Image (cartoon, rainbow, N blue to C red):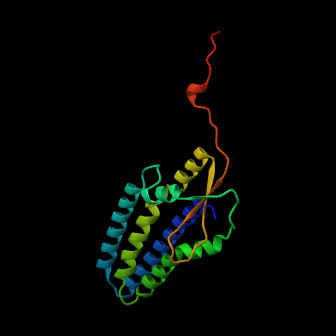
Amino acid sequence: MRFGDFLRTAVLLFAGAATACAVVAIAGARAKDDTSLLYVAVAWWVVATAIGLWMGRGAHAIEGIARLLADARSTQTLPEVEPGRVLFNRMWALALATIATGGLAWFLPQVPAIGAGFFLLAALWWRRQPSAVQAIEERDGVRFYVERTSPFAPTKLIRTPGFRKNVPAPTDVQRTSA
């Protein structure tokens, strides 16, 4: 699976997890008739949104992703494309955390409310990372793929040849006098 596509999917999965946790937190708070929890949860979500927007404002790759790109193993052959397996191996912890926090909503609706804020923060923080990876791929003429590893092993990337994007700079235009 291409790394940029993986990052796009991860952002959508984090946003979906935030939405699911928010819905069950609201349902749990309404079942207990706890309006103060709703006010605190909405305030936390606003703070998490502001933090996520602030941290994700740059157009560059964050340190962890830049390190992954730099440590990518080079190869001349394309890896097997197994997006389902790669997503499951890399995102199982998110699914487990979402299910666990959602399951606690009827007993402790505060837990999914807090989890929703953290998932929202992560989604907004990573929202520009696919574009940063795509810019690096176009600049260097490579493609990055997520390597198939164990679900408990760290993520590793594979670098394959790609196509470089050649765009003339505004200063490259020759000016002729009439």
Q: Is residue 50 above or below residue 29?
A: above
**Residue at the extreme top of the image, as rendered:** 178
Measuring 44% from the left and 85% from the top, which residue is drawn there? 100
x then y, percent, for residue 1: 64, 65
Quarter holding the C terminus is top right
Measuring 43% from the left and 50% from the top, which residue is drawn there? 58
Direction from residue 49 to residue 86 in the image, left or right: right
Which image quadrant is residue 173 in?
top right
x then y, percent, for residue 167: 62, 36
x then y, percent, for residue 36: 29, 78
Measuring 35% from the left and 86% from the top, which residue is drawn there? 108
Measuring 57% from the left and 28% from the top, which residue is drawn there? 170
Q: Which of 45/8 is in front?
A: 8
x then y, percent, for residue 17: 49, 74
Q: Which of 87/77 is in front?
A: 77
Q: Is residue 71 above or below residue 112?
A: above
Which image quadrant is residue 109 in?
bottom left
**Residue at the extreme bottom of the image, as rendered:** 107
Q: Which of 46/66 is in front?
A: 66
